Image (cartoon, helix red, strand yellow):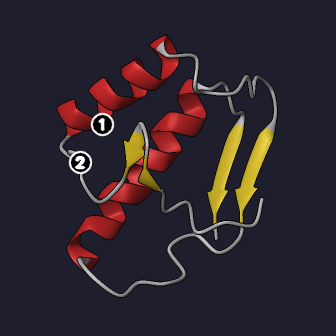
Amino acid sequence: MFSDLINNQGELNVNRLDLSEAGREQKVKQLREARLLPDLTGHGVVVHGFLREKTSSPDRFPLLESFCREAFEAAGAASVDLL
């Protein structure tokens, strides 16, 4: 996948996302319940370009990385690499 994974609209607006541990868990649960997570069971995910445009809020980057990993893992991904 080639993407920076920065979505700023709809159900997953990362600019407004609560990145606390509880907030990340709640958002993953909401996405799952809304059937917005794909079935990645057994697949490896490699994202090229993750957070390529690091222009603001660098303190959020590790938390965004954690959220993305958690979401892919909740979708069943066997492995996740964010490059």
Q: Which circle marks residue 36 in the picture?
A: none
Q: How far from the left and from the top, in percent, is residue 8? A: 41, 58
Q: Which circle marks residue 24 in the picture?
A: 1
Residue lying farthest to the top in this orientation: 33
Quadrant in the rendering for residue 44: top right
Residue lying farthest to the right in this orientation: 43
- Identified at 46% across, 25% down, the residue is 31
The residue lying toward the viewer, choosing from 69 and 15, is 15
Is 47 situated above or below 35? below
The residue lying toward the viewer, choosing from 62 and 18, is 18
Left or right: residue 38 compared with residue 74: right
Which amino acid does the dot numbered 1 rest on?
Arg
Left or right: residue 59 compared with residue 79: left
- Identified at 27% across, 79% down, the residue is 58
Q: Residues within 10 Å of mark 1 (few under 14, many from 20)?
A: many
Is 52 situated above or below 39? below
Q: Residues within 10 Å of mark 2 (few under 14, many from 20)?
A: many
Left or right: residue 48 compared with residue 69: right
Q: Are marks 2 and 1 in contact (CB under 8 Å)?
A: yes
- Identified at 54% across, 81% down, the residue is 52
Q: What is the distance, in whole Å, between disc 2 and disc 1 at their CAs?
A: 5 Å
Q: How far from the left and from the top, in percent, is residue 55? A: 35, 87
Quadrant in the rendering for residue 26: top left
Which amino acid does the dot numbered 2 rest on?
Leu
- Residue under pointer 2: 19
Of the residues under marks 2 and 1, which one precedes in the sequence? 2
Q: How far from the left and from the top, in percent, is residue 17? A: 26, 48
Q: Report the quarter where the C terminus lies.
A: bottom right
Is 6 situated above or below 34? below
Q: Report the quarter where the N terminus lies.
A: bottom right
Q: Under tag 1, what secondary structure?
A: helix
